[in-house]
Image (cartoon, grey):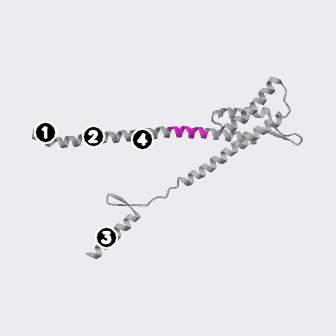
Amino acid sequence: MNVLISALPSLLGVAIGGLITFFIQQSITRKQQTWDKEKMILDILNKKETTKFEVFNKILHMNAKYPVLEYDIHRGPELNEKEYIERIRPLLYEIYHLLAESIVYEVENIEDIYERHYVLEAAEVGDDEVLALSYMKIMKLIKQEFKDLRESTAANLTIHKIPKKKWKWNSWFRYSEEEIREIEAHRKKNQKLS
């Protein structure tokens, strides 16, 4: 009986320690799972953004290489239907689900006019101007997204430059430079006294 009473505090300590360890591990595991889930979501978003900007690059390249928007001295800019449908439209629909609402609105505007042309087999007055304006807005919005990307990248690079705190190993502990100065001052003071 005495052995049981003397062993009881030890057993109680082991049980409490085990419970504390269990709850700490549960908390750490939950935090790790949350972090992994957030990281996975961020990775997916980054891949989608990368895909979107790669296609935007292709669109800008096609816009520069082919006469998608033709300029007439008397009528102004005019969207070249053949070049748009063959070169730009497939790229826009490749990333349609990733496009900003403002770009989608302009793409739909162009599609509605072309659909009306197809059904009615005739263009209405002002359609050419609307087509050209919508296409120019798409190009402007794409360029604005690149500008925003560059600005956010530059801002993130400056944010992530964290000043490094200099550490020096002393025995088993890490001390900051300020702590090391205090320790050395204390040692010097003790040496003078002895």
Alpha carbon distance from label 4 to label 3: 43 Å
In-front residue for pair 159/20:
20
Whether residue 67 is visible: no
The x and y percentages for residue 45 are 56, 39
Instruction: Mark 2 vs mark 1: give the one in front.
Output: 1
Tell me which numbered mark, 2 or 4, is placed earlier along the sequence.
2
Q: Secondary structure at mark 3?
A: helix
Tags 3 and 1 touching, CB below 8 Å: no
Q: Horizontal placement of 121 versus 58: left or right?
A: right
| Of the two numbered discs 4 and 1 in the rendering, the one whose residue sits closer to the viewer | 1
Q: Which residue is mark 1?
A: 4
Residue 124 visible in the current orientation:
yes
Circle 4 residues within 10 Å: few <14, some 14–19, many ≥20: few
- In space, the residues marked 2 and 4 are separated at their CA atoms by 20 Å
Q: Is residue 73 above or below residue 96?
A: below
Badge 2 amino acid:
Gly
Q: Which residue is mark 2?
A: 18
Q: Secondary structure at mark 2?
A: helix
> Total label count?
4
N-terminal of the pair, mark 3 or mark 1, is: 1
For disc 4, the marked residue is 31
- Label 3: which residue? 187
Quadrant for the N terminus in the image: top left
- The Cα atoms of the two marked residues, 3 and 1, are separated by 51 Å
Q: Position of residue 82 (x, y in %)?
A: 79, 32
**Mark 4 or mark 1, which has the lower sequence index?**
1
* Earlier residue among tags 4 and 3: 4
